[in-house]
Amino acid sequence: ADDDAEYTAVIEIDLADVREPIVCAPNDPDDARLLSAVAGDKVDEVFIGSCMTNIGHFRAAGKLLQKHKGGISTRLWIVPPTRMDEHLLMEEGYYNIFGAAGARTEMPGCSLCMGNQARVAANSTVLSTSTRNFPNRLGDGANVYLTSAELASVGAILGKLPTPEEYLTFAKDLDAMSDEIYRYMNFDQIMEFQKSAEEGKRIAAVEIQEIRA
């Protein structure tokens, strides 16, 4: 913000006081609650996707599903935000993990977040990593919690919103692998995308020359 920006209010939050995950309850993104207040609620479907996610979130989901080693009772939707995320996750073998768990993978993009690519079952309870959970947005009569990708993954495995203690048990595994999981994409270091970018430049240069001619 500009140095002279004016604010209606300044809210300071000491993160040391945040000892458990926070979710937004159905169906209001402003209705923030501690996980302990909603723990135990049954979960029917889980959506890990939208522009709020990055490749680390999908790796985290994959690691948790891989350790679980079994099917899940929820309907799990996996939707990377970009084709580049999808490509790298496929190369790293995560799509095999998602498939073994019975997850439904959609083409990269908005998907359930907009409710126009696909929709959850009517009146289902959903954990979503998107930013909005307005009534009927993801599905008719759906009750949608907004959560982190890590919490959504645990909910997909357990079929319910976990207790803080249950969540932290899973989170310990992710903490131990954080350097591997939360590596972000550097497009200039991915050879295939370098080639695509160079080819795009070449085509553009040829077209410009043809126009000038």
Image (cartoon, helix red, strand yellow):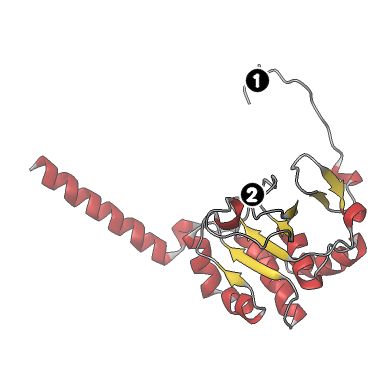
**Label 1 secondary element:** loop
Q: Residues within 10 Å of mark 2 (few under 14, many from 20)?
A: many
**Label 2 secondary element:** loop
Picture quarter with the N terminus: top right
First in sequence, mark 1 or 2: give its number.
1
Locate residue 157: give its quadrant. Answer: bottom right
What amino acid is labelled 1 in the image? Asp
Position of 56 with respect to 9 (left or right) is left
Please give the label number shown on residue 137: 2
Residue at the image point whose x is 66% and y is 61% from the top = 47
Label 1 vs label 2, nearer the camera? 2
What amino acid is labelled 2 in the image? Arg
Please give the label number shown on residue 3: 1
Residue at the image point whose x is 78% and y is 23% from the top = 9
Residue at the image point whose x is 83% and y is 64% from the top = 42
**In the depicted view, which residue is nearer to us: 212 or 177?**
212
Locate residue 125: give its quadrant. Answer: bottom right
As measured in the structure, the alpha-carbon distance from the residue carrying label 1 to the one carrying label 2 is 38 Å
Which x, y percent locates residue 23? 80, 50
**In the depicted view, which residue is nearer to us: 48 or 90?**
48
Which x, y percent locates residue 159? 80, 70
Residue at the image point whose x is 75% and y is 20% from the top = 8
- The reply to whether discs 1 and 2 touch (Cβ–Cβ < 8 Å) is no
> Can residue 117 be seen from the camera position used here?
yes
Position of 77 with respect to 144 (left or right) is left
Position of 15 with respect to 150 (left or right) is right
**In the depicted view, which residue is nearer to us: 113 or 67?**
113
